[in-house]
Image (cartoon, rainbow, N blue to C red):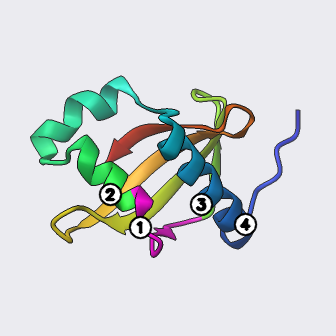
Amino acid sequence: MRRYKQSAARAGNALRELIRVALEKGYYTESLHSANDHPERNISPDDIIHGLERSDWELAKDPNWDDEHAGYEYLIRTVDIEGEELTIKLAIYPAEKRIKVITAW
């Protein structure tokens, strides 16, 4: 199956809506890497949700296809609860309106 590269601009609006719905309905999960590594990095699930709920987050680069997660992966640049810079790597599952946090730093 051929995958077409999505532009950051085109992906942005649809991604914001998908993230909003996923957070609102609780269709949000974390990878084992994300769940286990964030406490050491002082990044909590609340920091991630705060960053994703903000209206001013930006895509750090164009999305890439990720075979391991069978979907597009996005890097989102935002801030945590304390206002510190936060980058979140997400896998997106549009058919289920679900998101998965792969990692954050």
Q: Earlier in the sequence, mark 1 or mark 4?
A: 4
Q: Nearer the viewer, residue 87 or 19?
A: 19
State the image coordinates of residue 87 (x, y, percent, origin top left): 36, 59
State the image coordinates of residue 51 (x, y, percent, origin top left): 35, 60
CB under 8 Å between discs 1 and 2: yes
Q: Residue at x 35, y 50 (%)?
A: 49
Which circle, 3 or 4, is nearer the viewer? 3
- Which label belongs to residue 50? 2
Q: Which amino acid lies under the numbered mark 4 shown in the image of this protein? A: Ser
Q: Please say whether residue 60 is one of the residues in the magenta stretch.
A: yes
| Visible residue check, residue 105 | no
Relative height, residue 12 to residue 5 (above, below): below
Report whether 54 appears left or right of 33: right
Quadrant of residue 63 within the rendered picture: bottom right
Q: Which amino acid lies under the numbered mark 2 shown in the image of this protein? A: His
Residue labelled with disc 4: 7
Q: Earlier in the sequence, mark 2 or mark 4?
A: 4
Circle 2 crowding by C-alpha within 10 Å: few under 14, some 14–19, many from 20: some
Q: Main secondary structure of the magenta part?
A: loop
Circle 4 crowding by C-alpha within 10 Å: few under 14, some 14–19, many from 20: few
Range of residues picked out in magenta: 52-61
- Which label belongs to residue 54? 1
- Element at label 2: helix
CB under 8 Å between discs 2 and 3: no
Q: What is the number of callouts on the image?
A: 4
Report whether 71 appears left or right of 34: right
- Which label belongs to residue 16? 3
Quadrant of residue 36 within the rendered picture: top left
